[in-house]
Image (cartoon, helix red, strand yellow):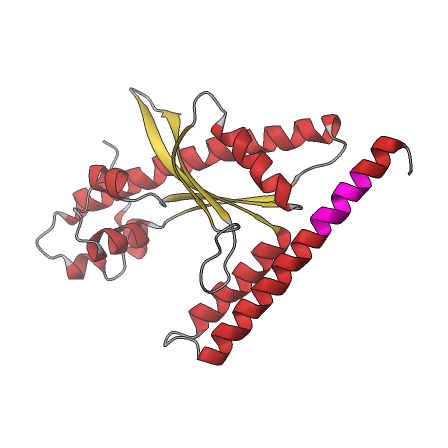
Amino acid sequence: MEPIEYSAARRLFDGVSEQFPDIDTANMIRQILAVENVYGSAAREISTKLENLNDEFKYTMDRNPIHNIFTRIKTPKSIVDKLTRKGYGLNYESARKNLDDIAGVRVICSYIDDIYMIAKFIIDQDDITLIRRTDYIRNPKPNGYRSLHLVVTVPVFLFQRTELVKVEIQIRTIAMDFWASLEHDMAYKLAEGKTAAMVNELRDCADVIAQTDARMQKLHDMVKQAQGTGAI
C-alpha cells in the first residue's frame, strides 16, 4: 500500500483519534479514505448517467429537464462520527453495510413530472438496483420538506474487483430545493432548535411553494397541449 500523508489525513480527522486511543488510527484512516474514494466513483457514475439523459432530451424534447446536478461525499470525519453514533465498527465493511448516504446525488429539475421521469430513467438502467424509495412529495415530512429519495446500488469497477456501491439520490424541483436549502441553513444556525412560530412559518412556506409547483406544472402541460394542437 502507498504511504499515508498523515499531515493531510490528520486535518480530516481532527479530534477523532483522541476519542479512540485504543484503535489503530493509521489503519482506520486508510480504510475510511478508501470508502471516500469508492463512493466518489459511484456518485460520478450516477451523475454521468443523468448528464447523458439531459443531453439526449435537449434534442429529443427540445429542453433540458435537469436544471442542476450536485454530488457530495461524506467527509471521513463525518463517516466516523456517524458510525460511532450508531455504534458500528470503524472500518470499510462497516461503512459499506450500515450507511446509505455516504455518496449523495441531488438532482434539481423544473417540473414535478420531471422528478418521476428522472427517477424511472435511473431505476430502469440495467446496472442499477433500487434498494429503497421514499416519496416526500406525495407524503411530505411534518416540517414541509418535499423531495423524492432513492437509494440505489451502482457497480464501481476497481483494479481487481467490481463493487456494488450504494448512492442516495434526491430529486426535487427548483422551488423545493430553494426551501430545503434555506431550512437547512436556518437549522444550522439555530443549534438549539426552532421556535414553534418558526416551524409553522416554514411549513406554510413549503405549502405555498408546493402550490406554486403544481401551478407551474399545469402551465407547462397547457403549453405542451397548445404546441400539439398548433395553437402556438
| Residue lying farthest to the right in this orientation | 231
Residue positioned 75% across, 44% down in the render: 220
Q: Is residue 221 magenta?
A: yes
> With respect to residue 199, does 10 lie above or below?
above
72 and 150: which is toward the camera:
150
8 and 152: which is toward the camera:
152
What is the magenta segment's predominant secondary structure? Answer: helix
Using the rendered image of the protein, determine whether residue 67 is visible from the camera's viewpoint. Answer: no
Task: For the N terminus, give its image quadrant.
Answer: top left
Residue positioned 20% across, 42% down in the render: 91
Using the rendered image of the protein, determine whether residue 94 is visible from the camera's viewpoint. Answer: yes
Q: Position of residue 85 (x, y in %)?
A: 22, 57
The span shown in magenta is 216-224
Q: Position of residue 134 (x, y in %)?
A: 43, 45
| Residue lying farthest to the left in this orientation | 22
Count the numbered circles shown. Answer: 0
> With respect to residue 194, does 95 lie above or below?
above
90 and 232: which is toward the camera:
232
Q: Is residue 76 magenta?
A: no
> With respect to residue 215, does 155 lie above or below?
above
Q: Position of residue 47 (x, y in %)?
A: 52, 35
Query: As drawn, is 169 to the left or to the right of 97?
Result: right
32 and 213: which is toward the camera:
213
Task: For the C terminus, give its image quadrant.
Answer: top right
Q: Position of residue 152 (x, y in %)?
A: 40, 34
Residue positioned 64% across, 33% down in the render: 54
> With respect to residue 40, does 141 lie above or below?
below
